[in-house]
Image (tube, rainbow, N blue to C red):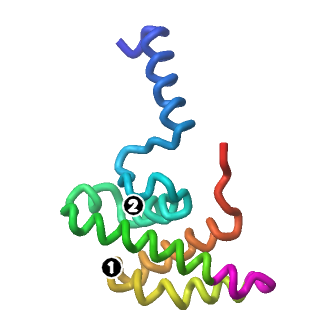
Amino acid sequence: MFDHPTKQYALFRKFEENLASREIDGIPDTLKKSPHARAYYGVFRLVLGEDYFAALSEEERSEFVALALETEALVDQSVAEHSLNPQSIEAAINKGLLPRLFKRMGMEKAKEAIERIVHITRVGLVDG
């Protein structure tokens, strides 16, 4: 059925509409209005894996939502305090996030998540 061109078009059109409106499955409604927190939540999902997130309870997922919002606040504060020196921004993000993320995901995954968060801070989010 997917081989039919009309079905392909309909499927890809729906995907394109969801992408344009930033409607992504698995992103909590709390984060819909905050693109940076949504990106940080996505980093957590990417680093820990979809299987890990599928096994979480609602309470555990809400902890990751809170962590994404805390991360957004910490990154904003780091950028505001160290706006003249990019290395200081990265150091402040590392210093602030490592203890928080280590408790939830261990050292290796925390370092990977922080690296991705720093990358988001460097390049920003591209609005399409």
Name the kind of residue labelled 2 in the image. Answer: Arg
Question: What stretch of residues is rendered in magenta?
Answer: 78-86
Q: CA distance from mark 2 to mark 1?
A: 12 Å
Q: Is residue 91 magenta?
A: no
Report whether 15 appears left or right of 52: right
Q: What percent of the width, then of the height, locates residue 53?
A: 29, 60
Membership of 80 in magenta stretch: yes
The answer to which of 6 and 64 lies nearer the viewer is 64
Amino acid identity at mark 1? Arg
Tell me the quadrant of the picture where the N terminus can be found: top left
**Image-based side of 28 in relation to 54, left or right:** right
Residue position marked by numbered label 2 in the rendering: 45
Vertical placement of 116 versus 10: above or below? below
Above or below, 126 against 97 in this view is above
Residue 38 percent location from the top left of the image: 48, 59
Q: Residue at x 19, y 63 (%)?
A: 57
Disc 2, SS: helix
Q: Earlier in the sequence, mark 2 or mark 1?
A: 2
Residue at x-position 21% and y-position 67%: 59
Quadrant in the picture for the C terminus: top right
Tag shown at residue 104? 1
Q: Residues within 10 Å of mark 1 (few under 14, many from 20)?
A: few
Q: Residue 87 in the image: x percent, y percent?
A: 72, 85
